[in-house]
Image (spheres, rainbow, N blue to C red):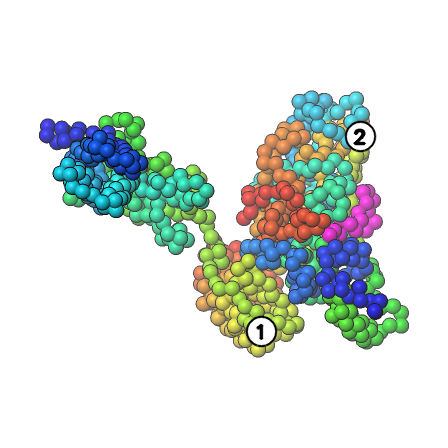
Amino acid sequence: MRTELLDFLGSLHPLVVHLPIGIILLTIAIDVFMRNKNNSVKRVITMGWFFSFLSGLFAAIFGWFLGDNGYYFEEQINIHRWSGVALVFLCFVIWLLLYLNFRFNRSFTRSINITAIILLMVTGHFGGEMTHGQNYLFENLPYVKKEISVTPLTEVERSEIDSLYVFEDLIYPVLEEKCMACHNKNRAYGGLNMNTFESMMEGGNSGVGILKNKPYESLIYKRISFPHDHPKFMPPAGVPMSYDQIATLEWWIDKGAKKLMPISLARKDAKMQRLMEILYKLDLREKSYLETLKLPALSSDDLNGLNGEKYIWRFLNAEESFLDVKFTAKTIQKVDLLKMQKVKENVTWLNLADCMLSDELLSDISSFPNLTRLKIQKNPLVTDKGIKALLGMENLSELNLYGTRVTDAAFTTLGQMTALKKLFLWNTRVTAAGIEAFKAQHPEIEVIAGL
Amino acid sequence: MHCNDHHHNENKNYTRRDFLTKTSLGLGALSLGSLISPVNAYGQSEFLNLLDSEKMKLPHFIPKAKRVIYLFQSGAPSQLDLFDYKPKLNEMFGKEVPKSIIGEQRLTGMSSGQNSFPMAGSLFKFNQHGQSGAWMSELMPHTAKIVDELCFIKSMYTNAINHDPAITMIQTGSELPGRPSIGSWLSYGLGTDNKNLPEFVVLVTKGKNGQPIYSRLWGNGFLPSQHQGVQFRSGKDAVLYLKNPPGVTSGIREEQLKSLKKLQKIQHADIGDPEILTKISNYEMAYRMQTSVPEVMDVSDEPQYIFDLYGEDSKNPGTFAANCLLARKLAEKDVKFIQLYHRGWDQHGNLPRDIKKQAKETDQATAGLIQDLKQRGLLEDTLVIWGGEFGRTNYSQGMLKPDNYGRDHHPRCFTVFMAGAGVKKGITIGATDDFGYNIAERPVHIHDFQATLMHLLGIDHEKLTFKFQGRRYRLTDVHGNVVNEVLA
């Protein structure tokens, strides 16, 4: 009964709080603009400060009750609470001094007026942040480009989609903001503690918090999606959850509410993928190795080695860090490959077709870490032995071996190349049976071996 | 005062206007391309300012395709007899096209006066092929076998209703002549991948009649002249005026060019006209082409089974099949844009008889080329395109007989297919209505098609621009959206 009364009084805070605001400002305005202060004016000012103090006192007391009901975070409420108390106290002191006919000089009057206005603004702003949400003041700032972000994901986190989890990175931060002021391990209103995944799932006095795969029967989902005037609607104060926050929670529960469900799962759901892209600014498209690789741009010094008749090269991206290199002379020597050493991290496509490439030189190529496409077709000196050197090339996805002398024995090596997606084997010594066996073992690799 | 002084002062600050006047009048080296990328060609001259800074960092993103082979079917092949299966037209054979279908759309003067517009269902049998189940008529049995490699766009449309503006549109992005061809834009934007051949090569099937094909279709428009397409002809002189005149040996020619280069360098140091550098490189390229062109045109090394793959025509120089084989050889040499033209698809009358012949000439070689590119690993970075400038009507132009009909021009819908680099395999995009007259699903305009082509080569079509006559131009003008559905 007592708490109910206090809660009721607490809810009067937003009503009463605007009285001292108006009275303080009016009192200061009278003080500033009515230069000719006869006795009546002085009495009006004294009275103004008295009513500022009185209404402020009520507002502070009601506010104290409201703050105590636990809907707000301590750290959020503290500045508001104590600056409010300070303001009320200041009003009281000013009134008392005026009442006792204490003589104020002009600069003293000015400084107490300014102090009162600053305290008023601080108190008002932080009070507003609690009810309207953080940054509410700047959300509608004109002529400024605003970053509308639902969750505070950093640029780095956004770029590493595969290491993000739905619960930890999208849902938990929202719960923290919207629910945990009351539902934490110290307070646990209604017996619900949302501090940990497990205790949240468990729920509180009314029952299980989240039923896996059943969003519409899960209490937490029900409470946040009620009509806003429903008595059980959550959160009871402050800004309700947004549509996308609710949709994310719904989708997550529907998919089994696993603690470690990766965000990348949204790729299978067109609507969620769109939502992630637009609202969370998460690019969920599957990316090739090169799309995720970042290298510094090359300078013309780096490229010196590739000048001359034997090479044709061009950049593959606007950042000028990936190279497509073709060797054009009829025969290749070790020295020709050494010239590429300086840019070996940058060579992503390499064409060494038809240049009498030998097995020995292949081991030099294998030290190009970011090579994804290698064309060494029409080199009759290349055999299974040379291919072995390519084993360590972890990013090579396309290998053209047509017109070399590789045999079925090469499949042992080729099968172990983790990134390999396409393999060209026309006009080699591999057998049809060998290819069939390899295809059966490695269905992910496309083998093109003639018509 | 020296009489040249005025001239000197003017050229110290070589203006855009001077340059453009010179290039547009000075198309001397018709057959010559250049090994120098456009940016290098202008070196450190003030002319650099003319090139848009956005264009400088190319490609804009990692490309899927490095080169394009465009098998252009001039005259507009009938999509209704080749790819776009419409059983409704057979069901309603001879009945009038419903008024609601044609509406107020314009027709050409060749058929708009007809009293009757009888629907002509195709006389050719259609079947589904491959795992993708793509519909193909019996006219293209070889291509039917490789449908799982192909991406059909059945909802292409264009603005123009006559050949010349329509071809100009699909080649340059504008119905009016004077803009650069696709190949010229690519040459300008991406430079070259080979040192001895031009970036843009054109092959025209010999001995065909029909709508004229002329060099402005592969012209550079307002781009520097080294970006124009170079036609390789069949027969003795693949490139005209490339051979040394009688009595001039290779040694003499080399000496001559060296001396000329000296003079040109003096001239360039004097007046700073960047087109002089272009000219030097043109001469050097021509000199190199004296050996590189005969080499690439020589197919005597090709084994018999390769000729078999492209079809019997492929041994007969100048045929579509022989040109397909050459296209592969040029692709192997990293020529960036290889455009074939095959005329004779403009079948206003006697379509069933004529289309059989046309299909036979192109079917096997097209399929053979795609397969040959595939086995060599070239299809990974080569985009192959097959298609015309517009489609043909679902009604018969002239008298409809049970075994004969003609079809008029139809810009409202037509089919193009693509294969290779970066394009999804075995899919069909877009659809026409049951009457094969209007587009029912996913319209793809010529500019969308061009934007997609550029995208596959790593170019943002909105960023590759050239400033001319006071505004920036681009291939897609102010239109075009990449057709994301075709991207693998």
The CA distance from mark 1 to mark 2 is 63 Å
Residue drawn at point x = 60 percent, y = 31 percent: B440
- Say what amino acid the circle numbered 2 marks: Gly
Judged left or right of residue A31, residue A244 is right
Is any atom of residue A198 visible in this view? no
Q: Which residue in the protein does label 2 denote? A: B109
Residue B82 location, quadrant: top right
User: Quarter holding the C terminus of chain A?
Assistant: bottom right
Q: Which residue corresponds to the image point at 24% horizontal and 43% vertical from the top-left?
A: A109
Relative image position of residue A64 (x, y in whole percent): 17, 37
Mark identifier at residue A305? 1
Q: Badge 1: few (under 14), some or many (20 or more) residues near its Cα, within 10 Å?
A: some
Q: Is residue B210 left or right of residue A332?
A: right
Do the numbered discs 1 and 2 sit on residues whose CB atoms are within 8 Å? no
Magenta stretch secondary structure, dominant: loop
**Residue B402 appears anywhere in the view:** yes
User: Vertically, is B477 above or below B14?
Assistant: above
Mark 2 surroundings: few (<14), some (14-19) or many (≥20) residues within 10 A: few
Residue A439: x and y in percent read: 49, 56
Residue at screen point 76% across, 45% down: B177
Q: Residue furthest left?
A: A2
Quadrant location of the N terminus of chain A in the rendered image: top left
- Residue B71 lies, in percent from the top left, at 70, 49
Q: Is residue B209 magenta?
A: yes
Identify the amino acid type marked 1: Gly
Protein chain holding label 1: A
Q: Which residues are magenta?
A: B205-222
Helix, strand or loop under label 1 = helix
Q: Which mark is residue B271?
A: none
